Image: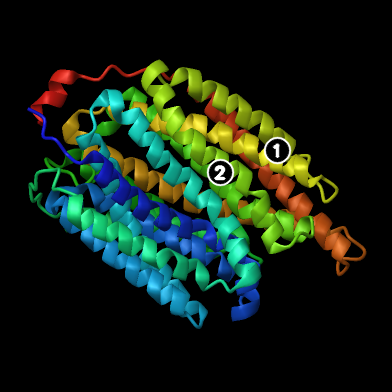
Amino acid sequence: MKKQYNTRAILASLLICGFVGMFSETALNIAMTNLMDVFQISAATAQWLTTGFLLTLGIIMPISGMLLQMFTTRQLFTGSLISLIMGTLIAALAVNFEMLMFARVLQAVGMALLLPLMFNTILVIYPPEKRGAAMGLIGLVIMFAPATGPTIGGLLIEYLTWHYIFWLSLPLLIIGLLIGLKYLENVTDVTKPRIDLLSVVLSTIGFGGVVFGFSKAGEGSEGWSSLVVVISIVVGLIALVLFIMRQNVMHDPMMNLSVFKHPMYVVGVLMVLSCTLISMSIMIILPMFLQTGAGLSVFTAGLMLLPGSALNGILSPRMGHLFDKYGPKWLVIPGLVIVSVILWFFTTLSPASSVAFIVALHIGLMVGLGMIWMPAQTNGLNQLPPELYPHGTAVMNTLQQVVGAIGTAVAISILSSGMEKYMRGSAASAKQAEISNAMTAGSQNVFVFTLIIALIGLVIAFFIRRVVVNREAMRTIH
């Protein structure tokens, strides 16, 4: 007999906390120029406020599958919220870059525990036929929260200071914690798996090394030829190969890679990763283009991103219902067609492009991504047997954060190299008009990169098919 949970209250608590955590991931993107002036730091250093956040997620998330089996749901939830609240409070009080960076790491630790917990809890407390709708609400968090970050951040910077991004978040996190403490129950069994220290070390060096290497490539004049970049990526890749080999021979692996034996899970992961690359690249480059390329204010740039973000949030639960009814194919393939067409239009943007045109493109992009993300993710997770839920969510979330960090670094790198190439051919590189043109040239290169990712995703999408959930397997865990 399946245990009855107060699913609405549990979901509300997880959504509030997840929303604030994901919001903070991108809210500072719009403040980058402002923070560079306030703290007297370079663009490459400021980028670490985003990349460092993602790097921490990428290091901690691989062990989340193990943590979900070692601790109760309530213990992990409480731990994640304490870390998030402390990080947010320190960020709100930050007086220098180092203090803010430390706060971002604390926030990332909280999110690294909360995100897998959120997905795993939904998989346990909702039956398969209702998961699409629940995952659609999570889609509101994963897509809507990071997308509204630049808008709300821009508004706060225009009229207050960047500190208020965090002062606004703090009471919401406390409310989410109190609701969770009242209604969240322990939904999984604690099995106390053996901790394999070698796996933890290899995972940390592997995922951390790759993300660090890609992040450093976006800095300085040496770029990809830097010895630090090459060594970091090579050492990281070697550690990942050793990590994978070790997981495959262990009886009780830290990260069970047998999830990749399920083809629709693999397709779902690839769809999610393509969406992550596209959205992270656009979210960091578009605000920069709007401010430096098009010469718009922080507030105007943020406001322009609001309609698309709002529509994505409104449509995400609806996409979940449509997935429950029709399956993934009729959402994912049209979604990727829309995204590809929109990104092609993005490659034509210039300082002369109208505000209405850019807003329309952003709306189209956010709608298209909303049609892909949750249906593909839910369909993939549905194919896993219940005992692999913690590992399936850990693998998907880990790859998503690592690819997000890589996407951010690659986008910055492509932007920088495009700007430098344009400036080398400019006779008046100090003029504002030429700086705008250089930003446009670099941004267009990034948009071409995201278009290629979307087209690859479209090809993969033709292999997606609806998963029929094994109800007997579902009954065995309840």
Residue shown at 26%/38% (left/top)?
A: 122
- The label number, if any, that marks residue 262 in the structure image: none
Quadrant into which the C terminus falls: top left
> In the depicted view, which residue is nearer to us: 73 or 395?
73
The residue at which mark 2 appears reads as 310
The answer to whether 37 appears left or right of 436 in the picture is left
Residue 474 % position (x, y): 16, 25
**Given the image, on which type of amino acid does mark 1 rest?**
Ala
> In the depicted view, which residue is nearer to us: 291 or 418?
291
Residue shown at 23%/54% (left/top)?
A: 180
Q: Quadrant of residue 84?
A: bottom left
Q: Is residue 453 visible?
A: yes
Quadrant into which the N terminus falls: top left
Residue 227 % position (x, y): 53, 64
The residue at which mark 1 appears reads as 360
> In the depicted view, which residue is nearer to us: 159 or 186?
159
Q: Is residue 256 visible?
A: no
Residue 135 % position (x, y): 36, 35
Residue shown at 69%/38% (left/top)?
A: 361
Residue shown at 40%/69% (left/top)?
A: 88
